[in-house]
């Protein structure tokens, strides 16, 4: 038996066309959080990303957008409060455990 995929398929309307995207739960969750914070629905945000993407693959463009969005929001104070940069693996392992 093969290993069960961790990818979740959902339908999204991009530029007026319905399409299916397969991404990890954490990516879908992060995309939903961005939509909520920016007061956009998922279709409008995915259309914005798709219209302005420089990456060939649509789902890769969405993943890259999410990383860039959160990197732009990260601050040194936020990293300190999260315990980042203290030279131990424990904080990194905590991030991996929450995936």
Image (cartoon, rainbow, N blue to C red):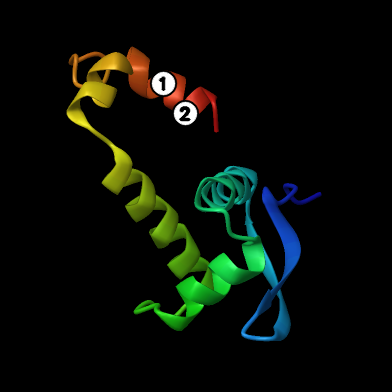
- Mark 1 — residue? 93
Query: Is disc 2 surrounded by few (<14), some (14 to 19) or many (20+) residues within 10 Å?
Result: few
* Pick the front one: 75 or 38: 38
Which residue is drawn at the image coordinates 23% and 18% (left, top)?
80
Where is residue 16 shown, x and y percent of the image? 69, 86
Query: Is disc 1 surrounded by few (<14), some (14 to 19) or many (20+) residues within 10 Å?
Result: few
Whether the residues at callouts 2 and 1 have beta carbons within 8 Å, the answer is: yes
Which quarter of the figure is the C terminus placed in?
top right
- Mark 2 — residue? 96
Which residue is drawn at the image coordinates 81% and 49% (left, top)?
1
Relative vertical location of residue 60 with respect to residue 52 in this rendering, above or below? above
- Residue 49 in the figure: left or right of residue 2: left
The number of numbered discs placed on residues in the rendered structure image is: 2
Tell me the element at label 2. Answer: helix
Instruction: Identify the residue at the far right of this view.
Output: 1
Tell me the element at label 1. Answer: helix
Which residue is drawn at the image coordinates 76% and 51% (left, top)?
2
Where is residue 97 shown, x and y percent of the image? 52, 23
Which residue is drawn at the image coordinates 21% and 22% (left, top)?
77
Where is residue 55 shown, x and y percent of the image? 38, 77
Residue 75 marker? none
Instruction: Identify the residue at the far front of this view.
Output: 39
* Pick the front one: 39 or 76: 39
- Residue 25 in the figure: left or right of residue 49: right
Relative vertical location of residue 86 with respect to residue 2 in this rendering, above or below? above
Relative vertical location of residue 65 with respect to residue 94 in this rendering, above or below? below
- Residue 77 in the figure: left or right of residue 29: left
Mark-to-mark CA distance, 2 and 1 = 5 Å
* Pick the front one: 63 or 18: 18
Where is residue 74 shown, x and y percent of the image? 28, 37
């Amino acid at each position: 038996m093969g290993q069960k995929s961790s990818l979740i398929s959902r339908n999204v309307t991009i530029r007026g066309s319905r399409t299916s995207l397969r991404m990890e739960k954490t990516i879908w969750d992060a995309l939903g959080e961005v939509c909520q914070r920016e007061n956009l629905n998922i279709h409008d945000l995915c259309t914005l990303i798709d219209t302005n993407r420089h990456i060939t693959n649509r789902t890769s463009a969405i993943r890259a957008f999410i990383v860039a969005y959160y990197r732009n929001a990260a601050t040194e104070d936020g990293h300190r409060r999260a315990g980042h940069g203290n030279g131990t693996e424990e904080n990194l392992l905590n991030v991996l455990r929450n995936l």
